[in-house]
Image: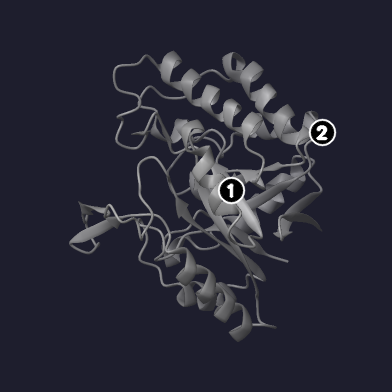
Amino acid sequence: MLTDYHIHTVYSDDSEYPMEAVVQDAIAIGLTEICFTDHVDYGIKKDWDDPRGVEYRPGGAGEPEQIILANVDYPRYAAEIGKLQEKYRGQITIRMGLEFGMQTHTIPEFERLFARYPFDFIILSVHQVEDKEFWTQDFQRGRTQEEYVGRYYEELLALVRRFHNYSVLGHLDLITRYDPAGPYPFAKLRPVITEILKTVIADGKGIEVNTSSHRYGLADWTPSKEILRLYRELGGTIFTIGSDSHKKEHLGAYIRETMAELAEMGFERYCTFERMRAVYHRL
């Protein structure tokens, strides 16, 4: 069984990948199950139908001239997934998820969204803190490495203590991807990461292994192998594997290799999800 549980499509504002093309490509490369997890980032983005209107950014290389900055068009998203599930039944299993780009002050909006649809799977990620993006360095600017790294994990810990309608933590150490100062010592982070993982495990949730670390040229996995070993030591058993794909060439990338390395690290099973319940599979 080969799965990809972190996939973005045209419903995310940073992807132009048509949903049906994802399904067809997934079948072609031998994936047996996929989950769509398009972006929702309250705080910095409005909903697609917000009466206050949405914003746009200039398109980059290979993108349309303008890119809408808005969350998923939920009714169309759910309807298209339903149609694809029926059309490709027997060829591939398709699950409906979202990636919640959360901050503590946006919890009420995500609670309302979660109650509206029968999701299979939710990734809890932190892409911004204080409505400041990591990738633009707006969050890091004016802070020392110790300050911005510490603040990131502080926000993540507060979220897992207060929000419970998720399946796994996405790319748990994401801040490393956008850290101009380089890797921050794991020994200094171990106490707060331990507290995060203990909270996740006690809540019956899990973490993901995000294979995009390869295409970003990172020195370690996301999350790092040290974090994965700590998770295993603490008794964590729920984890998914996802490519974080936004384009055809990302889909399913490094899934097989990651499964093999996880088995070598001592992990025995990984998970898929159905209606927010983990389903275990042998690596």
Left or right: residue 253 compared with residue 143:
right
On residue 169, the disc is none
Label 1: few (<14), some (14–19) or many (≥20) C-alpha neighbours in 10 Å: many
* Residue situated in front as seen by the camera: 23 or 185: 23
Where does the image place residue 252, in percent across and percent down from the top left?
55, 62
**Label 1 SS:** strand
Q: Quadrant of residue 60?
A: bottom left
Q: Is residue 210 visible?
A: no
**Label 2 SS:** loop
Q: Which residue is mark 2?
A: 235
Q: Quadrant of residue 3?
A: bottom right
* Residue situated in front as seen by the camera: 231 or 265: 231
Going 61% across and 15% down the picture, which residue do you hit?
187
In the rendered view, tell whether residue 177 sits above or below residue 45: above
Q: Which residue is mark 1?
A: 123
Going 51% across and 75% down the picture, which residue do you hit?
80
Single out the residue that lies furthest toward the front: 51
* Residue situated in front as seen by the camera: 26 or 194: 194
Q: Quadrant of residue 237?
A: top right
Where does the image place residue 46, in percent across and percent down from the top left?
35, 50
Single out the residue that lies furthest toward the bottom: 87
Where does the image place residue 117, in percent across and percent down from the top left?
60, 62
Where does the image place residue 128, in percent across and percent down from the top left?
41, 35
Quadrant of the image containing the C terminus? bottom right
Amino acid on which disc 2 is placed = Gly
Left or right: residue 110 compared with residue 230:
left
Q: Earlier in the sequence, mark 1 or mark 2?
A: 1
